[in-house]
Image (spheres, rainbow, N blue to C red):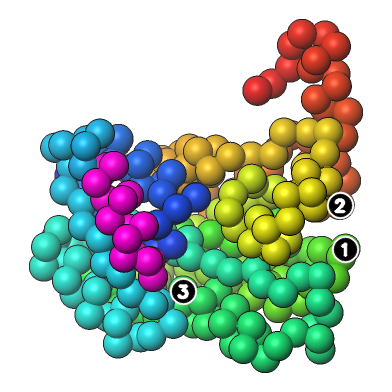
Amino acid sequence: MDSLKGKTALITGASMGIGEAIALNLAENGMNIALLARSKDKLENVRVKIQQKFPSVRVQSFPVDIQNHAEVDTAVQSVITELGEIEVLINNAGLALGAPARFWELPIDLVTQMNGTNIAGVMYTTHSVLNRSMWPGKRGTIINVSSVTGLECPPFDGEAVYHANKACIEGFTNSLRMETAGSDIRVLALRPGCVVTNFHLQRVKYDNDAMDEFFYGYEPLVSEDLADAVWFMLSRSGRTSIKALDCVPTAQRSLTRFDREWNARRDEKGHGYT
């Protein structure tokens, strides 16, 4: 890829976790950063952190609800005005709510909220960025953060909406890649496996015991692992597309199979991957 230094990246869900880590990584590599999320205070904390660590980088925060197209479109126009044309879009914002309730047991407002963020929010942001920046210039990279659950149904209750959302994002990504032929726009998917973030804590209703049980015996990914994966995808030559990248803990051998002796082997032998 041509040098991204000095170019602008827009990141949704940028107020914490994976979004924050991606923002810091791209800023470290010289990109200007537009941070989008709902929480004004959390966004501002991330903005200040980036500005202090990388004073030569321009960074702005835009508190919006990505379920609202008008808010998103206004924010995208502001990004272009303040930071320049958008070279990179990272659709990272996502929600998994209500587990372990089965689909028909979920309050309908949770169904609406997940669909609004995980599907409509991705489409609204992408629609605006393409129309206002990428398509006129016929260039840019879009990375949609999907999930390994987007291709295979999780083996536990409470995932019907989230799984369907991520399966939709897989289809949307593939279709958009086809429709942007005739341009230099790359449309890619990143599929995280198990990551220890507030996202998963929210998923288990902030039950730390449930979190510990889920990650027992192995090392899950951390947000910075996903940020490294994003930079790997972005930094390839412009003639190369990493169309989809699964990034999982080595101990996660499949969606349902975990090597829960991973930590024990490392501790016993005094080596292993960290």
Query: Does the stretch in magenta take in 69?
Result: no
Task: Please name the amino acid that badge 2 sits on.
Answer: Thr
The quadrant the C terminus occupies is top right
Q: Dot 2 lies on which element?
A: loop
Task: Please name the amino acid that badge 1 sits on.
Answer: Pro
First in sequence: mark 3 or mark 2?
A: 3
Q: Residue at x 52, y 83 (%)?
A: 116
Instruction: Classify 10 Å Cα crowding around label 1: few (below 14), some (14-19), many (20 and above).
Output: few
According to the image, label 3 marks what residue? 122
Q: Position of residue 231 (x, y in %)?
A: 42, 41
Instruction: Classify 10 Å Cα crowding around label 2: few (below 14), some (14-19), many (20 and above).
Output: few
For the stretch drawn in magenta, what is the main secondary structure? helix
Task: Please name the amino acid that badge 3 sits on.
Answer: Val
Cβ atoms at labels 2 and 1 below 8 Å apart: yes
Instruction: Classify 10 Å Cα crowding around label 3: few (below 14), some (14-19), many (20 and above).
Output: many
Cβ atoms at labels 3 and 1 below 8 Å apart: no
Q: Position of residue 255 (x, y in %)?
A: 81, 52
Residue 88 placement: quadrant? bottom left
